[in-house]
Image (cartoon, grey):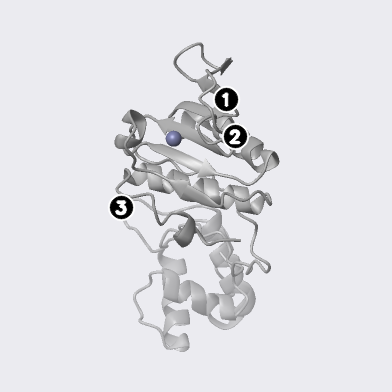
Amino acid sequence: MSSFAYVSSELGNVKPETRSIAEELYNVAKAAGREIWFMWGIGTSAEHKTGLALDLMVRNEAAGDFVRNYIWANRERLRLRHVIWEQHITSTVVQPGVRRKMADRGDPTDNHYDHNHVWFFRGSYRPPPSPTPKPPISTPKPPVTKPTVKQRTLYWNKTTMLSGNDVLALQKGLRRVFPLYAGRLVLDGKFGRATDKAVREFQRRAGLKVNGRVGPATRAALRRYGVRL
Ligand SMILES: [Zn+2]
């Protein structure tokens, strides 16, 4: 089977979209086992002068039928004006879709028995829709990450006392794990003076910055002792 480079070697200065369509037609015909063995583009006829017409040469009727039917099926995307095959013209403009018999011009080429003649409207090339992409063979699993919930920093706020289940969990954890200095914490869920004192003691013993604030670093250190807020 001839290469597209050879088959398209005489297209001349056709419009870019015409060349792209020519390549598409060559490829789909080839994939279907139907060969377009040569193409003509720029020529002396009124239609071929526009750079928007192609003659798609085939060696048998099956290949010609395939090319004609593919072009017609894709007429909107390809901006088809008309296609001529086997002495019949099918237009998208004049009696759209009707295969109209043409006058006998004499030989098989003039009567389009050895090629489809197609003429397009101007417009940028639109490639056929790509097939649905196949999933990759192995999908790497995303790393297991816990949902990140923004956790508030707990501290002794002397104007508006922080309270809640997170404070309660902190108090319970400190009391359970560090009975030596937190064993008497009142489990009231309110971050007051006593809780502040216990947190500071924990931070001091854990080698953390002693500021009484339970932020990410102190939480991480507490987690190492099994205290989760
Ligand atoms: Zn022609």
Spatial CA distance of label 1 from label 2 is 7 Å
Residue at screen point 68% across, 67% down: 137
Question: Percent from the top left, x then y, of residue 29?
Answer: 61, 48
Q: Position of residue 38 (x, y in %)?
A: 51, 51
Q: Quadrant of the C terminus?
A: bottom right
Q: Which mark is residue 113?
A: 2
Find numbered disc 1 in the image and state the secondary structure of the residue it sits on: loop
- Alpha carbon separation for disc pair 1 and 3: 94 Å
- Looking at the rendered structure, the number of numbered marks drawn on it comes to 3
- CB of mark 1 within 8 Å of CB of mark 2? yes
Q: Secondary structure at mark 2?
A: loop
Task: Identify which amino acid the numbered label 3 is placed on.
Answer: Thr
- Reading the chain from its start, which is encountered first: label 1 or label 2? 1
Residue at figure coordinates x 61%, y 61% from the top left: 1
SS type, badge 3: loop
Graded by Cα atoms within 10 Å as few (under 14), some (14 to 19) or many (20 or more), the crowding at tag 1 reads some
Ligand 1 located in image quadrant: top left
**Residue 131 in view, yes or no:** no
Question: What residue is at 35 percent from the left and 50 percent from the top?
Answer: 160
Give the left or right position of residue 36, taking residue 40 as reference: right
The residue where tag 3 is placed is 159
Callout 3–callout 2 Cβ contact below 8 Å: no
Which tag, 1 or 3, sits closer to the chain's start?
Answer: 1
109 and 60: which is toward the camera: 109
Query: Is 104 rendered above or below residue 215?
Result: above
Q: Which residue is mark 1?
A: 87
Q: Amino acid at mark 1?
A: Gln
Q: State the CA–CA distance, disc 3 to disc 2.
A: 95 Å
Residue 178, image x, y percentages: 58, 80
Which residue is outermost to the top?
Answer: 95
